[in-house]
Image (cartoon, grey):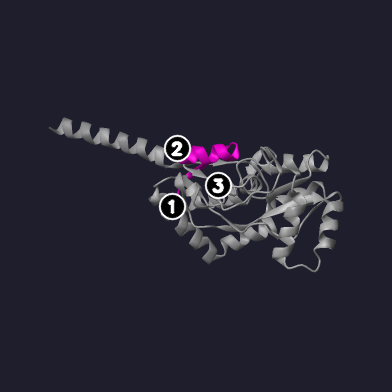
Amino acid sequence: MKKLLTALLTGAASLSLVACGKSNKLVIGTNAAFPPFEYKEDGNITGFDMDLIKKYGESVGKKIEIKDMDFDAALTSASTGKIDIAIAGITKNEKREKTLSFSDGYYSSNQVVVLSTTTANEIKTATETMTNDEKITYILSQLEGKKIGVQRATTGQFYVEGDADWEFDGIKDAKCNPYDNGGLAIKDLNDGKIDAVILDEAPAKNIVSKNYSTTLSILDSALTEEEYAIAVKKGNTELVNSLNEFIKTIKANGEYAKLLEKYFG
């Protein structure tokens, strides 16, 4: 009996260690070509989102393993449970909530238009006295029939092509050119291969200011209003609740403000 009890306890301890090993790590999927949220620096993946999720790992006592992948692959991997969390400047909306569960929003963003500085200045002059809604209507009229670069599977692509689930009408006769990341789209714009790029504001500003400040400009009028959130497998309410508590805590204790200061000034 004593031997049996010892064997049972030993077996239970082994299972506990295995379970502990599995649960002691969170696998994170991201697309490290979306500065300043996620990008590579000296071979390491860094950025606002990466610092955020590392702080979450610290708060719950778990190791973080970051995997770089295409944006849509990160969403699919989270929905199928191949990774625990996807964080990559992901806009939460009803369409994505059909296959994923999301945390509360942690960053407000929007889509902006990147153009050659010459074209941008012409539009700014033409819309100087217009209301914001009038400006957007005018901007969209100028994009009709144009070749527009976007990051694949992001809000920008849905906006250009039109998507009923996102309540986007699309841009009339525009040719949507999807890229693996926004940097490639903006490079092609600078090289004259496309006419415009529609991209999230923060990475657009980051890429243009660092590489194309003399040739490209961003229009002031935003096309959308969005909220970034952290994605997990559908129905994982325990992880969602944990993430929400973390977001609430770091916004209250000043850590979130420090991250904003670090990456956005």
What residue lies at 78% left-to-right and 39% top-to-bottom? 188
Find numbered disc 2 in the image and state the secondary structure of the residue it sits on.
Answer: helix
Quarter occupied by the C terminus: bottom right
Identify residue type, mark 3.
Ile
Query: Which of the two residues, 117 or 102, is positioned nearer the viewer here?
Result: 117
The residue indicated by pointer 2 is 80
Instruction: Using a 10 Å C-alpha cutoff, classify the residue at mark 3 as few (fewer than 14 neighbours), some (14 to 19) or many (20 or more).
Output: many
The residue indicated by pointer 3 is 87
What residue lies at 81% left-to-right and 66% top-to-bottom? 128
Marks 2,3: beta carbons within 8 A: no
What residue lies at 70% left-to-right and 54% top-to-bottom? 112
Query: Which of the two residues, 59 or 93, is positioned nearer the viewer here?
Result: 93
- Report the number of numbered marks: 3
Does label 3 or label 1 sit earlier along the sequence? 3
What residue lies at 21% left-to-right and 33% top-to-bottom? 8
Question: Mark on residue 240?
Answer: 1
Which region shows up in magenta? 60-79
Identify residue type, mark 1.
Val
Does label 2 or label 3 sit earlier along the sequence? 2
Identify residue type, mark 2.
Thr
Visible residue check, residue 245: yes
